[in-house]
């Protein structure tokens, strides 16, 4: 596979209470174009910081070292196909789905307009074409009655429905990379499974690369081809999903797996084999 991006010696630190706290420490990682990679670890492991760094969404106060190298040929302007950009644009080339859709959606704007605005901004569509795209996307994320949903406000939707809208907005401009940062952790088990199935389908249909960030190794095993395990800002283990689940090398990975033994172990092993 062709590399979509290469991360080399990436370090990120924040200032807290007058001192510098390392969030990522010398991360080296390649993500191939079209692959499904899961980043797992407990809270504070650095996985969300990595996702934000890749998307260019870290706060200005963050101190960043190392580099992220992109395959420039992936990022052509939709208005000038011959024009290559050195870095991707968040919203255009990178779609980002956050943990809490209520925080990422505008509460006073109908969801149809929110999705349409992404298409207008990044694809240069007029409002009629942008709304038509928004309706198609609501159909693709399996939101009931898409025509009516275009005029619906976020507070009128359930948590799972709002996350579907957030996914539709994230893919509205046809990104090469979709980042789902704990996108299922605020949902109940049944809705989690539905969202994971939806993400898998959309990624496959659109040929997107997926970075799935989660603390749940069972969900990661269901969705990803490879799993990278983070702990205390360090990448402690990475490998094919079946290898990580069946023969983990690091004690921390084994601890994450042990948390699921007796609950979801056998189905997880089967899913890992299917994802490999």
Image (cartoon, rainbow, N blue to C red):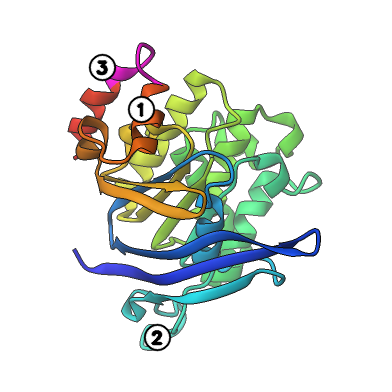
Q: Nearer the viewer, residue 169 or 196?
A: 196
- Identify the residue under disc 1: 257
Mark 3 is surrounded, within 10 Å at the Cα level, by few (under 14), some (14 to 19) or many (20 or more) other residues, namely: few
Q: Position of residue 133 (x, y in %)?
A: 51, 54
Q: Position of residue 154 (x, y in %)?
A: 72, 38
- Identify the residue under disc 3: 266
Q: Residue at x 34, y 56 (%)?
A: 209
Q: Residue at x 19, y 40 (%)?
A: 276
Q: Nearer the viewer, residue 13 or 195?
A: 13
Queried whether the magenta region covers residue 264, the answer comes back as yes
In the figure, 150 relative to 260: above or below? below
Q: Is residue 72 left or right of residue 52?
A: left
C-alpha gap between disc 1 and disc 3: 11 Å
The mark lying in front, picked from 2 and 1, is 1
Quarter of the figure with residue 148:
top right
**Mark found first going from the N terminus, 1 or 3:** 1
The mark lying in front, picked from 2 and 3, is 3
Look at the numbered disc 2 and give the secondary structure of its residue: loop
Q: Residue at x 31, y 64 (%)?
A: 30
């Amino acid at each position: 596979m062709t590399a979509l991006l290469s991360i080399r010696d990436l370090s990120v630190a924040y200032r807290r209470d007058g001192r510098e706290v390392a969030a990522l420490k010398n991360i080296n990682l390649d993500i191939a174009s079209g692959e499904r990679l899961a980043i797992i670890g407990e809270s504070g492991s650095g996985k969300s910081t990595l996702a934000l760094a890749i998307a260019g969404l870290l706060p200005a106060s963050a101190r960043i070292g190392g580099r992220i190298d992109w395959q420039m040929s992936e990022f052509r302007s939709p208005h000038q196909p011959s024009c290559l950009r050195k870095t991707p644009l968040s919203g255009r080339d990178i779609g980002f789905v956050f943990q809490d859709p209520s925080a990422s959606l505008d509460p006073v704007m109908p969801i149809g307009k929110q999705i349409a605005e992404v298409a207008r901004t990044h694809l240069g569509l007029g409002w009629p074409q942008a709304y038509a795209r928004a309706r198609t996307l609501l159909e693709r994320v399996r939101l009931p009655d898409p025509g009516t949903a275009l005029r619906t406000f976020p507070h009128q939707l359930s948590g799972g429905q709002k996350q579907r809208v957030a996914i539709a907005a994230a893919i509205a401009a046809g990104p090469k990379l979709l980042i789902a940062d704990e996108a299922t952790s605020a949902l109940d088990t049944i809705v989690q499974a539905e969202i994971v199935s939806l993400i898998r389908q959309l990624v496959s249909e659109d040929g997107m690369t997926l970075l799935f960030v989660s603390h749940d190794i069972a969900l990661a095993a269901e969705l990803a081809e490879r799993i990278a395990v983070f702990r205390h800002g360090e990448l402690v283990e990475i490998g094919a999903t079946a290898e990580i689940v069946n023969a983990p090398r690091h004690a921390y990975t084994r601890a994450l797996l042990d948390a699921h033994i007796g609950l979801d172990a056998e189905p997880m092993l089967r899913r890992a084999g299917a994802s490999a």
